[in-house]
Amino acid sequence: MYKNYQKQFADELKEIKDSGMWKEVGVMEGKQGPEIEIVDPLHGHHGGGRRLLNFCANNYLGLAVTDELAQAAIDGIKKYGFGEASVRFIVGTSTIHKDLEEEIAKFFGQEDAITYTSCFDANTGLFETILKEGDAIFSDELNHASIIDGVRLCKAERFRFKNGDMDDLERQLREFHDRVGNGTDHSPSADGSRPVPTRPSRLLIATDGVFSMDGITAKLKEICDLADKYGALVMVDDSHASGVLGKTGRGSIEQAGVIDRIDILTSTFGKALGGAGGGFTAGRKEIIEVLHQRSRTTLFSNALPPAIASAALYVLQNYDDKFIHLRQTLEENTAYFRSAMEKLGFHLGGDGKHPITPVMLGEEKLAVEMAAKLFEEGIYVRGFTYPVVPKGKARIRVQISAAHTKEQMDKTVAAFGKVGKEMGIIK
Ligand SMILES: *Cc1c(COP(=O)(O)O)cnc(C)c1O
């Protein structure tokens, strides 16, 4: 039977290649870190490992390859075993999960928390669990794919507001609010076309804390103000900011001073706070309990493996004493790299605070070609083109880590300078 389908799939693959959207996977030999060895190089090279400086990981604090975290993971395995072989509510909840959830809540200033095997799962298990027909979700257009997919699963009315555009958000909140109400209107429509709802409508504003392609932060204070005005809940996905932004690393919610104003926080242990995986939802205790009871990605998927739970707990428990200085280093590294790149004449995106440093190039071809040339210079960065970013806004996204040395950054800046001049991007 497959014979009939084979050509279809082959055609589809050819289409992807022809459109320039083919993703070539760089295969690493051994550990990732500021220096990596790519076994199967990009852009048509084959065979032979290649040592490169890695400037495209989310390893913001450099914790992903520390012996300390590996040991914390091993300790978890020794004490709790390799896995629970169960979902949480059957026989998958160990004390490590309870301890970690308590620590997450404490660390991020929330009432309670629930872990998931990824933040993707946290997001896809969130919206349909707490929203239904008659409710409304207001989602920033640049939100992460997992929020988009999560929103797709729920039957609430969907509104998409322009990135960071508070007027657009307010216009849509007002429209829904005037038409349906905000938690007080409990009546059927006049013509009887709308049945009596079992509860008043819920409104929820959902946003990334940091938008990953641009390295800019959401306007969380303004969003919370609008939520107050129109009676909406606020959900923030702080995957790129937890452990990175805010004076004490609590994320964009700390930087914006809204730790106690948001209702739902999702984030990952796969970036700054570890690097292996694992995610969570934190927030109001009733909402977290509803997730435990009803969220499909926890009810029908295995518990977070003990190794990861143990390492995540270790990071949170030791963050304030042992790791917070890395946040400072990260900030200094980011400032150092940005200023050197700007001096060369590159146009950088982002707000300058976040280690995501987009080198804006415009044309799709430039981004792909430049990444390939930098690869030849021993620098590993990735070009991002349409549809990941808007047409004509292609870029190379450089990501700075606390683990990068000055020498490594200097080498990368020099390579950007050389290639940039060759390509006529800078003078
Ligand atoms: C990386 C990321 C995720 C996915 O996190 P995982 O734990 O790897 O699934 C979700 N949301 C945002 C905003 C992210 O940047």
Image (spheres, rainbow, N blue to C red):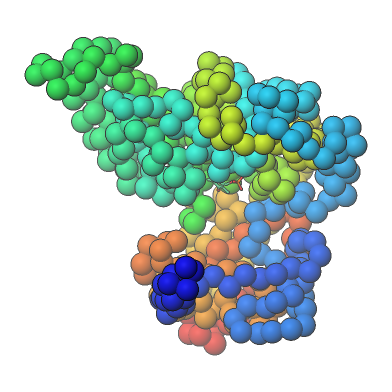
Q: In percent of the image, x 73 and y 45: which residue is there?
A: 274
Judge left or right: residue 257 versus residue 176: right
Extreme left residue here? 191
Extreme bottom residue here? 422
Query: Which of the two residues, 4 or 235, is positioned nearer the viewer here?
Result: 4
Query: Which of the two residues, 379 or 44, is positioned nearer the viewer here?
Result: 44
Judge left or right: residue 4 versus residue 60: left
Q: Is residue 157 above or below residue 405?
A: above
Q: Is residue 137 above or below residue 424?
A: above
Judge left or right: residue 322 versus residue 166: right
Q: Is residue 236 above or below residue 215?
A: above
Marks counted in the figure total 0
Query: Which of the two residues, 420 or 399, is positioned nearer the viewer here?
Result: 399
Q: Quadrant of residue 228?
A: top left
Judge left or right: residue 373 versus residue 70: left
- Kindly tell me whether residue 411 is visible in this rendering: no
Location of residue 235 in the rendering, given as x and y in whole percent from the top left corner: 47, 31
Q: In percent of the image, x 54 and y 70: which residue is there?
A: 23
- Kindly tell me whether residue 90 is visible in this rendering: yes
Q: In percent of the image, x 21 and y 12: which residue is there?
A: 187
Location of residue 325 in the rendering, given as x and y in whole percent from the top left corner: 76, 43
Q: Quadrant of residue 203?
A: top left
Location of residue 76 in the rendering, given as x and y in whole percent from the top left corner: 85, 36
Q: In percent of the image, x 53 and y 32: which residue is there?
A: 296
Location of residue 124 in the rendering, given as x and y in whole percent from the top left corner: 50, 39
